[in-house]
Image (spheres, rainbow, N blue to C red):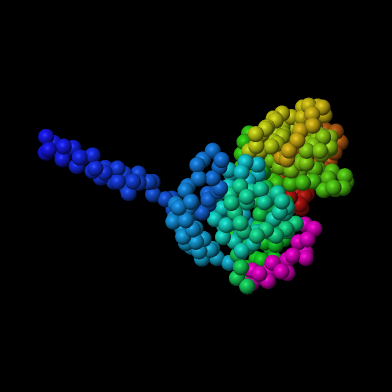
Amino acid sequence: MNALATAAKTLALKPQPLLLIRHHPPHRIPSSPSLLRLAFSRPVSSSTSPPSSSDAADEQPSVERRETASNSASLESGLYLVATPIGNLEDITLRALRVLKSADVILAEDTRHSGKLLRYYNIKTPLLSYHKFNEAQREAAILQKLHQGQTIALISDAGTPGINDPGAELAKLCAGENIPVIPIPGPSALVTALSASGLPTNEFTFVGFLPKHAGSRRERLLVASDQTETQIFYVPPHKLQEFLDEALPVFGDSRLCVIARELTKLHEEFWRGTLGEANRIFSSRHPKGEITVIVEGKEKFVAETPSESELEHELRSFVSNGHSISMAVKLVAEGRAAKRKHVYALALRLFGKHTESEPSSN
């Protein structure tokens, strides 16, 4: 009995399995590469339990410092044109996030608007306003910072910088002074709308916003209506009806169009039909959100080459109606877009020696 009691007492006091579990935590998935960790280092949501204070103190600070230093060192000096989401905040690239985190300063059209994106991804880089009303005053200081070796990121309110915003002028200035201009590609409303429009995409013209003056708008619409390429316009929501009223008599009511709005957002819509139908439907609708209007190009007219019998018939008709042979050749050549020498040769065959001297022009 004494031996059994001693053995039982020894087993009861033996804590090794429990100690092994405590000192060897469950297997953890290896941490993601520094780029992924840096890009998605967002605050933990309320639905997720945060790590313990001891874990945060032991692991996170040293990793954060190493990653930040590594990425800053790998980013070369220059102007970075960073494309940002046009609606859905998830439509941003890992490279864009890394550049925004590592830049010395971010230029933004509206710092309050862009601040929402930066807060969403926990980006602490300083913001500096840069828009059409202050670009002239900012340019000298920005160029100086770039010449000093700083890294500057430029973002617009939405989409790709330099497309219908002040970024184009700054990129031009930097290129002229041999300062690197690095595009960070991403969302663009015009490409997004065109890709899903169902209209030809092999050739297109991006018109953007039309001029404010009514006469200038009409002139631009006249040019666009005569082109065979697909035409792309940016239209403010409160000016959609004005655009349709002005485009209808220029393009005609049968020209196909696509009205894309709220792209990548919850209420994304692609309306498809003719300009005539759009003018009628949207006269009683008042859509909200940024709008991209895509209009099909002018139908290509391929003139048929007239046959020799047709040309001969017209030559006989003109001559029988009293026109001289030389005048008949001229009228037929111009009317049928044919070479005058070819028409003259036909006249020579038809009328022989009665044909007048050959026209000198072709």
Q: How many marks?
A: 0
Q: In the picture shown, does residue 182 fall above or below 119? A: below
The residue shown at (59%, 54%) is: 123
Q: Nearer the viewer, residue 313 or 284?
A: 284
Residue 90: within the magenta?
no
Query: Would residue 308 be found to the left or right of residue 136 on screen?
Result: left
Question: Residue 280 location in percent, x, y?
Answer: 81, 27
The residue shown at (79%, 37%) is: 240
Query: Would residue 236 be found to the left or right of residue 101 on screen?
Result: right
Question: Residue 227 location in percent, x, y?
Answer: 73, 43
- Dividing the picture into quarters, in which one does residue 77 lie? bottom right
- Dividing the picture into quarters, in which one does residue 226 lie? top right
- Dividing the picture into quarters, in which one does residue 167 lie? bottom right
Residue extending farthest front: 2
Q: In the picture shown, does residue 281 fall above or below 93? A: above
Query: Would residue 205 be found to the left or right of residue 95 on screen?
Result: right
Q: In the picture shown, does residue 361 fall above or below 346? A: below
Q: Name the chief secondary structure element in magenta.
A: helix
The residue shown at (51%, 54%) is: 38
Magenta-highlighted residues: 132-147
Question: Residue 69 location in percent, x, y?
Answer: 50, 64
Q: Nearer the viewer, residue 34 or 353?
A: 34
Q: Nearer the viewer, residue 203 or 111?
A: 111
Quadrant of the frame with the N terminus: top left
The residue shown at (70%, 46%) is: 206
Question: Residue 333 location in percent, x, y?
Answer: 76, 42
- Residue 179 shows in the view: yes
Q: Nearer the viewer, residue 86 or 349?
A: 86
